[in-house]
Amino acid sequence: AQLRLEEKRRMERELEALFSAEEPPRSIADYDNLQPVMFELNSILASTQDYSLSFSTVDASQAIVRRSISMSFTTGTYESAKAVLQQLHDFRCMLDSVNVSVGQGEQDAVSVSGNIVFFEYQAEPKAPAA
């Protein structure tokens, strides 16, 4: 019982510190948040030479919806590719299976591919299809 009480107090202190910070924590966007996601992705990827997005079926079987997107983009430098990945990371999504390839010779283009998963909140999960 003492261990549980200590753990509860530790979590309460963490939450208190989190909510008293200068910038409060962000909440998960409500489902269906596709249009703001598309605007933000376009804004982030506009600095690339080209990009491609491929959308998977949305997993809405639970309260936290997962929107998976396969992406690829090309930039002129490693630093600009890193900046794009940092912006994607800061947009509250999970980056997965990221692959970075640096060109050789005159074409020093940097190609990046991977998956992005956005999380959205759904008050009432959809029942799985029978």
Image (tube, helix red, strand yellow):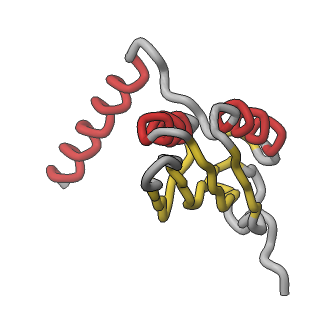
Q: Residue at x 73, y 55 (%)?
A: 53
Vertical relation: 77 (above or below) 55: above
Vertical relation: 8 (above or below) 96: above
Along the line of sight, the residue nearer the viewer: 123 or 99: 99
- Quadrant housing residue 68: bottom right
- Quadrant housing residue 12: top left
In this rendering, position of residue 56 left or right of residue 75 = right
In this rendering, position of residue 59 left or right of residue 34 = left
Q: Is residue 63 visible?
A: no
In this rendering, position of residue 96 left or right of residue 130 = left
Along the line of sight, the residue nearer the viewer: 109 or 85: 109
Image quarter of the C terminus:
bottom right
Vertical relation: 66 (above or below) 7: below
Q: Residue at x 55, y 60 (%)?
A: 114
Residue at the farthest bottom position: 130
Along the line of sight, the residue nearer the viewer: 113 or 123: 113
Please provide percent x and percent y for residue 125: 75, 61
Please provide percent x and percent y for residue 64: 64, 55
Please provide percent x and percent y for residue 91: 57, 36
Residue at the farthest top position: 22
Image quarter of the N terminus:
bottom left
Q: Is residue 30 visible?
A: yes
Q: Residue at x 70, y 30 (%)?
A: 43
Residue at the farthest left position: 2
Q: Residue at x 28, y 30 (%)?
A: 13
In this rendering, position of residue 72 left or right of residue 76 = right
Along the line of sight, the residue nearer the viewer: 55 or 33: 55
Please provide percent x and percent y for residue 113: 56, 59
Q: How many marks?
A: 0
